Amino acid sequence: MAAEDNPEEGKPKVTPRQMALALFEDMFDLGLPISEASREIGYQRNNFFTQVVNMGLPARRFLDAAYFIVAQEQEARDQYDVELNYFKWLMRYDSRNLKHLRTIAEEAQDAKIQVTDTPLDRDPNENDLWVSVQLMGMVGFHRGRVRFDVHPRLVPHIRDPKKSHWLSLRISTAFTRSLARAIYDQVLPSVPNGRTEWIRLEDMRNWPGKMGANAAIFKYFKRDWLEPAVREINEVSDIELSYETRTESTTSKKIDRIRFLLKRKDTADAALASLADASHLYKILKEEFNLSTKQFSEISENREVWTDAHIQQAVEYTRFKLNRGQIKRSPAGYLMRALRDNWKMSEAERKMVEVQAKLLTEETDAEVVKTETQASVARTIASREEEVRARMNEESRKGREHFNAADARTRKELIRAWVTSREGKLMLRRMKLEAATVTEEEIVGSAELVWYLGQFIFGRVNSSRAAA
């Protein structure tokens, strides 16, 4: 196998898990939290995990750390086992209070994902769908390690999500307010759209778990929870967030709806997250080139340099080489090499492609014109043939009407004239009948013979009229 065919071959690869472990080893002894890491740590999180509600900040961090570990494993496992200090670092848990950590684990175990098709305006019935799955299974701490498992139905959604967004552990662990983190989770899938749908305040108050009694009153909720959460999101995250409120109806004065307006910041974190936002690029890389998780991770790590334009340039170059038959194996590996070495099409190559495309278009257009001309001629001929058939059928009908209206003697003379004519003899020979013995009943009883008889009579009648 040539190196050019598989440029990934023989090159040491650093997985996201290995990178995270290396950062942990460098930073743990210095007492530096994950939020101050020099490199990005995160994973593509499935959009439906943002729907988890009634969960506090520490439990969210616990789930983040666990799902990051599940997402980075090369193969799904029945149980995951890592060093406890590493797990605590991933979730930014600085305390040595293991009793509290157990309480956090229990809260994470209590969290569930529920799916139902029951409308909100009625009670469920036996035909409705309802599924409830725990987000965290068994959790155990022993001898400086943590072991846990995740429901097997959830593992594919964690490891290979379809609709997803980038979750940075550097950012998610920087939050200190439960509502800020809950809002951040909920709005991430909507960042590419620039805003969320209208959300009921009653629903939003359930996102972070228990809140004070004053949270039910909007002016206190806004002052003590919402505004501080918005400020923290804008300070520590990769998005800029503002909001609008409204009442349920024009006659009500009670504010009960909220909508968030969103924009990515111009930062390295935002550049990384934008890979998930650029759904067309993600689809090309995933479906056309089938990039692996490792290759996606390398792109994510280099998003400051590997912009959308840089990736599109590499995709264009790789497609060009594929179309010329110059890539024999691993188009994904070739694309990664093009990204690393900044390969792109030269102006001469681009011009050549344009000229070839133009020639192909002209050739195709000429073929289309030729085909359409042939089809038009064929339609004209068919139309004329149809007109001739219709005219001849009409002539035969009129001839038969004249025959049927005639007396017996005239009909006998018409029959004799037809069977002795050249046309009549040919038809009778085809039908294996003798002119001397064929009867009027046989001729009239045959749809084919009577048709030609009608044609013959119409011709005689017209000739007689023209002579007169």
Image: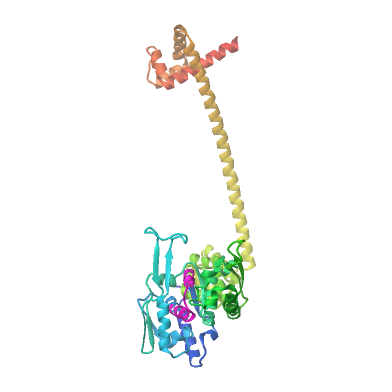
Is 83 positioned to the left or the right of 384 in the image? left
Rendered residue at 50%/19% (across/down): 397
Residue 252: x and y in percent read 60, 63
Q: Quadrant of the C terminus?
A: top right
**Residue 307 visible, this orientation:** yes
Q: Return the residue nearer the eye: 271 or 307.
A: 271
Q: Nearer the viewer, residue 90 or 354?
A: 90
Residue that appears at 41% across and 81% down: 105
Residue 65 on the magenta segment = yes
Residue 16, x across and y down, in percent? 47, 80
Please identify the residue farthest to the top as the structure is shown: 409
Q: Nearer the viewer, residue 33 or 294?
A: 33
Quadrant, the N terminus: bottom left
Residue 408 lies in quadrant = top left
58 in magenta: yes
Principal secondary structure, stretch drawn in magenta: helix
Q: Nearer the viewer, residue 111 or 5?
A: 111
Q: Which residues are magenta?
A: 45-66
Res 299 visible: no
